[in-house]
Structures are given as structure tokens and as C-alpha cells.
Image: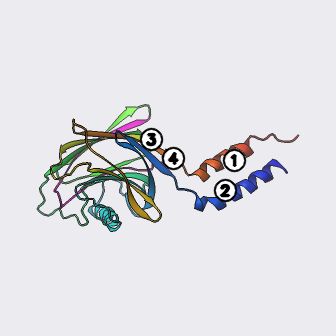
């Protein structure tokens, strides 16, 4: 059978299989273990042009996770989501279902230092007094340092890298500056599978009050196979 016909039939078969294959995901690696985080859907999220979460976006994240039985208050929760900024790695810090900034006084503080390639954007937010700085490290790499404060059980904070399909690898380091109401292993990694969110693993700060992890984007198996087939069909010789 002609090679191009074989390729077309193979691509057709793969497209039919795609709905049954696992979605693309990221692998998170830290001192406490390695976890695969699959993406859930949050359309209408991270669409701003000022690198900020809105309070309503933080509310939506916490309410959705809480509805799946995941406690976000007193936790630093990381997960993957399809957003207006692409497939995004999101950190929700001490998430409450309804943020109320009226009369709030920041009493919890977290430092975040994160790097990835320069092909995507960042988002960060906290109460008044929170600060975020961006740096171009050269060689196509960017760094964001954030000092985030909030009022425990009244407000929350967040950080995200957008479009991990483009900026496929990165690092995140957390600094416990003052998280007095947090219990042991407050860091949790959450994945979306079988139509619900679930905790994939937990972690704790080191004796130096730090926790670092790296992540790597893994494309869906169908996408990898389609790219391989594209190369197969693209390299065949033209008959003279």
C-alpha cells in the first residue's frame, strides 16, 4: 500500500483514539515526590492584560475545588487548568470561596520565585502591599519574584504561569515568610481526572522554610504520534 495512504489511515485512526487518550499534562517533581497533573477547564480565567487575578477568579477557583471536596483554606494548592491564557499552572494560596477585602489586614505572607521560558505570561495577586517583580534573565528565560500577603479566612492570593504548552518547563520556589495558621504538609498538588479534581500529593516546607519544585509539560500521546506521522509523510522522496 502506498506510504501516503498508510499515513492517512494511521492519522484517521489516531484521531479516533484521541478522545480516549490521556490529555496533555505536566509532571511536577519536588523533594516529597513526583506527581502528574492533568488539566481541568476554567474558561474565562486569566484573560487580563495587567498580570492580575481578579477577586472573582480567585472565588471561582476556590469554590470549584471546594465543591470537589478539596480544602483550600490553610493550603497552597497547585493545579493545571485550561484558561484564556492557555493551559496554565496555577497556585491558589489559602483560597476562600468568597474573597472580602473590606477591612482586611494582611496577616499571612508567602514568597514566590518562579522561572520559565520567555514565551508566556505570568499572573499574581494578593492584598494591598503585595509586590511582584519581573526579570529578563537572558537566554530566553524569565523570572518572577512575588511577595504576597492576605488576610487568613477573609482573602486569598494566587500565582500562575500561562501557556505551559509553549513554555514547557519551569521551577517554583516557595518561602514561608509567615503562614501561622497552616498545618503540616500545607502544599498540595491537585489533578483533574474522571471528571473531578483530586489531590495527587502533598508536601511540606523544609527546615529553612522553603519548598522548591520543577515541572515539565508532557503532550497528549495522540499529539506526539501525529507529529511523528507528519515527519514520516514529509520526508518521503518525490517520484521522478
Quarter of the figure that contains the C terminus: top right
Q: Earlier in the sequence, mark 3 or mark 4?
A: 3
Q: CA distance from mark 1 to mark 2?
A: 10 Å
The crowd level at tag 1 (other Cα within 10 Å; few <14, some 14-19, many 20+) is: some
Q: Earlier in the sequence, mark 1 or mark 4?
A: 4
Indicate yes or no whether the magenta region holds residue 6.
no
The crowd level at tag 4 (other Cα within 10 Å; few <14, some 14-19, many 20+) is: some
| Mark 1 vs 2: CB contact within 8 A | yes
Indicate yes or no whether the magenta region holds residue 150.
yes
> Helix, strand, or loop for circle 1?
helix
> Is residue 152 found left or right of 195 in the rendered image?
left
169 over 83 or under it: above or below: above
Q: CA distance from mark 1 to mark 4?
A: 18 Å
The crowd level at tag 2 (other Cα within 10 Å; few <14, some 14-19, many 20+) is: some
**Residue at mark 3:** 169
Magenta segment boundaries in residue numbering: 140-165
**Which numbered marker is on residue 229?**
1
**Disc 3 or disc 2, which is closer to the eye?**
2
**Residue at mark 4:** 218
Q: Earlier in the sequence, mark 1 or mark 2?
A: 2
Q: Position of residue 34 (x, y in %)?
A: 41, 44
4 over 236 or under it: above or below: below
Q: Earlier in the sequence, mark 2 or mark 4?
A: 2
Amino acid at each position: 500500500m502506498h506510504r501516503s495512504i498508510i499515513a492517512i489511515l494511521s492519522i484517521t485512526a489516531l484521531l479516533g483514539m484521541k478522545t480516549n487518550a490521556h490529555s496533555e499534562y505536566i509532571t511536577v517533581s519536588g523533594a516529597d515526590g513526583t506527581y502528574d497533573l492533568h488539566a481541568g477547564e476554567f474558561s474565562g480565567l486569566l484573560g487580563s492584560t495587567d498580570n492580575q487575578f481578579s477577586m472573582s477568579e480567585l472565588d471561582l477557583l476556590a469554590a470549584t475545588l471546594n465543591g470537589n471536596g478539596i480544602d483550600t483554606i490553610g493550603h497552597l494548592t497547585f493545579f493545571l487548568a485550561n484558561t484564556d491564557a492557555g493551559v496554565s499552572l496555577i497556585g491558589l494560596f489559602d483560597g476562600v470561596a468568597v474573597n472580602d477585602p473590606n477591612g482586611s489586614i494582611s496577616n499571612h505572607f508567602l514568597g514566590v520565585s518562579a522561572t520559565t521560558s520567555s514565551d508566556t505570561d505570568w499572573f499574581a495577586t494578593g492584598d494591598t502591599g503585595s509586590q511582584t517583580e519581573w526579570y529578563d534573565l537572558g537566554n530566553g528565560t524569565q523570572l518572577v519574584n512575588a511577595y504576597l500577603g492576605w488576610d487568613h479566612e477573609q482573602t486569598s492570593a494566587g500565582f500562575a504561569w500561562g501557556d505551559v504548552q509553549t513554555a514547557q518547563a519551569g521551577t517554583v520556589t516557595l518561602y514561608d515568610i509567615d503562614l501561622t495558621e497552616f498545618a503540616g504538609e500545607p502544599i498540595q498538588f491537585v489533578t483533574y481526572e474522571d471528571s473531578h479534581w483530586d489531590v495527587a500529593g502533598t508536601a511540606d516546607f523544609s527546615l529553612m522554610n522553603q519548598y522548591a519544585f520543577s515541572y515539565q509539560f508532557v503532550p497528549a500521546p495522540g499529539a506526539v504520534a501525529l507529529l511523528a506521522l507528519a515527519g514520516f509523510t514529509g520526508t518521503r522522496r518525490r517520484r521522478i
